Image (cartoon, coloured by chain):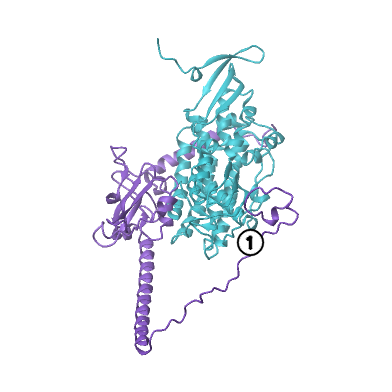
Amino acid sequence: MSAPVDSLSQPRFVAGDNGDRLLQVSLGPQHPSTHGVFRMNVDLDGETVVRLKPVFGYLHRNHEKIAESATYLGSIPYTDRLDYICSLTNNWAYALAVEKLAGIEVPERAEYLRIITAELTRLINHTAFAGFILGDMGAWGSALMYAFREREKILDLFEDLTGARMMCNYMRFGGCRCDTPEGWVDRAKKVVAEYPAFLDELEQLLLGNEILLARTRDVGALPAATLLDGGITGPLLRAAGCAYDVRKVDGYGLYSRFKFRVPLGGHGDCYDRIMIRFLEMRESLAILREALDTLPAGPVINPKVKVRAFKPPVGEAYARIEGPKGELGFYLVSDGSPRPYRYRVRPPSFINLTLLEDMCLGRDLADVVVILGSIDIVLGEVDR
Amino acid sequence: MSAAPKWIPPGIGLLQGLAVTGKNFIGSFFRADRMTTVQYPEERVTLSPNSRNIPFLVFDGGDPDTGLRCVACGICEKECPPQCIYIVLDRDENGKSLKRPKVFDIDASVCMNCGICAEVCPFDSIFMDQEYELSSADRFKGLLFDKATLAKSATYHAKIRPLEAAAVAERKRAEEAKRAAAQAAKEAKAKADAAKKAEAPPTISNARPAGGSASPPDLSPTRSGQESDPPKSTQPTAPEEAP
């Protein structure tokens, strides 16, 4: 007797709705194009996708339950590990929720530093996205390496400021953990000033490329109304022409002071999604230039907030920010103890993924990979 | 999809992209901003002074046993998010605290280098190291760092993080000066008191009156309109909870 084979991981035939014989392929969880350990069971009629069922949970780390047994402060390093490409925006969303819960004021300089770090994070995310999606289309290497080379410059800034490249653990309730080191602002200004040249280069590399156009134009498009019904946010929704940006809608932090535009797409296909991210990077750079030039002096943390034994009053709060991937929210319920009674994350990656099947139906299997790439997921956030 | 506004000969985008690849390829031989690879074991990048990795314990002076600043208060142990710190307070034979750790272990395989221990420590005794070559052949004992492994001198701290160490030294100096001043004031006061005592015989001046002036507190709760309800507990119900 041979050992039983895991039948789910083998391609097998299943019955379709009208009695057809469909080939079920398990894509992932270790496939390099599935962005981590995401798995989907794709039912194929020939090359065409007839059904697609995502299988979640390979990277489940109990984030929300751990946060209920950790102190409010102790959860900040865990939020770094949600969407590990954009740790600082995760920090900010969580800090914002606690500040709303406890009614904490944030000094002006800290708000500026938050905007600066969050916009740098957006640059990192969108740059890495451009590299990843090219990898999904088969252009391994060049684009990703160029993207990571530039990303490294921003990660160096983060290491200088926060002590770590990716797991920054920087925001605190009522401000930021530490002030900028000597010369940091000038270095940041230099990186921001040099970035547009790199973006020009990347756009020249990608956006006119006939292969990229053939692979992404009219692929995975859904009408804006469907996306809204599905709760999709972020660049995905804006690529379909719906002007929704939490930075404009809520004006959290001091975003209402800054002048920036919200780029909108016209078709909602994968090409628009790539294009939207390039345009957003230009707007982020405009915010960064303004913020770095007008960075006020002053304290970076509200001295009234206790670091240890922090206890917010009884209540609940939901705070959201415009993360690089969409609306990132934290919902907290406090019972007055040093640990949250309930801690819930609204992860943009996970919710944006819910319409994957609708985007992929009727497309080829090769398009599934591109559509998944264009959603821009991070499994740390999907599975939590 | 609407027609493209202007006709572009096919293949131009591809060639444009190839030009960028070529520029990067040639640049990777001589342009500093495109030569980013560091030949790691031979070459190393200089770390930022803020860069953090596994925590370490600071000791003053030459002896890591007696000079350890840690008083085993256990705050870091309690605040550590992944609970990787284990402390046992050292006691003498009478059970009196010696204000130093008998055991101070950090499990490096659990530690996530967040730096919260260093942030919450009120005694400036635990800081974040910059040592990153921590691999070990023994995954259990080799990664469980004990007190002797964790203890590093204050000079080492000043070397890796000059600014932070200087701020700590400044704070310590200020505290020392304050303590010395308080001590001097106390001694002067004691001297003055002794002089006063020598002048006049001691009297009990601030003894409390024996009876006590506080009236007994009114403990009867205001429960108008609640008499018909059966009491849910022995505790008096707060007025707001009344229906």
Q: Colour of chain A?
A: cyan
Of all residues, the one furthest to the left in this rendering is B62
Asked whether residue A138 appears in the rendered view, the answer is: no
Q: Quadrant of residue B84?
A: top left
Whole-percent x, y for residue B184 in the image: 35, 78
Whole-percent x, y for residue B111 in the image: 39, 45
- The chain to which mark 1 is attached is B
Whole-percent x, y for residue B240 in the image: 70, 55
Q: Residues within 10 Å of mark 1 (few under 14, many from 20)?
A: few
Q: Is B33 rendered above or below residue B220?
A: above
The residue at 54%/37% (across/down) is A206
Which residue is nearer to you in this view: B169 or A324?
A: B169
Of all residues, the one furthest to the bottom in this rendering is B199
Question: In screen coordinates, is B215 left or right of B154?
Answer: right
Residue type indicated by callout 1: Leu
Of all residues, the one furthest to the right in this rendering is B225
Asked whether residue A213 appears in the rendered view, the answer is: yes
Residue highlighted by disc 1: B219
Q: Colour of chain B?
A: purple
Question: In screen coordinates, is A8 left or right of B170?
Answer: right
Q: How many marks?
A: 1
Whole-percent x, y for residue A215 in the image: 58, 29
Which residue is nearer to you in this view: B236 or B56?
A: B236
Q: Secondary structure beneath disc 1?
A: loop
Which residue is nearer to you in this view: A193 or B77?
A: B77
Q: Quadrant of residue A200?
A: top right
Which residue is nearer to you in this view: B70 or A365?
A: B70
Of all residues, the one furthest to the front in this rendering is B211
Which quadrant holds the N terminus of chain A? Answer: top left
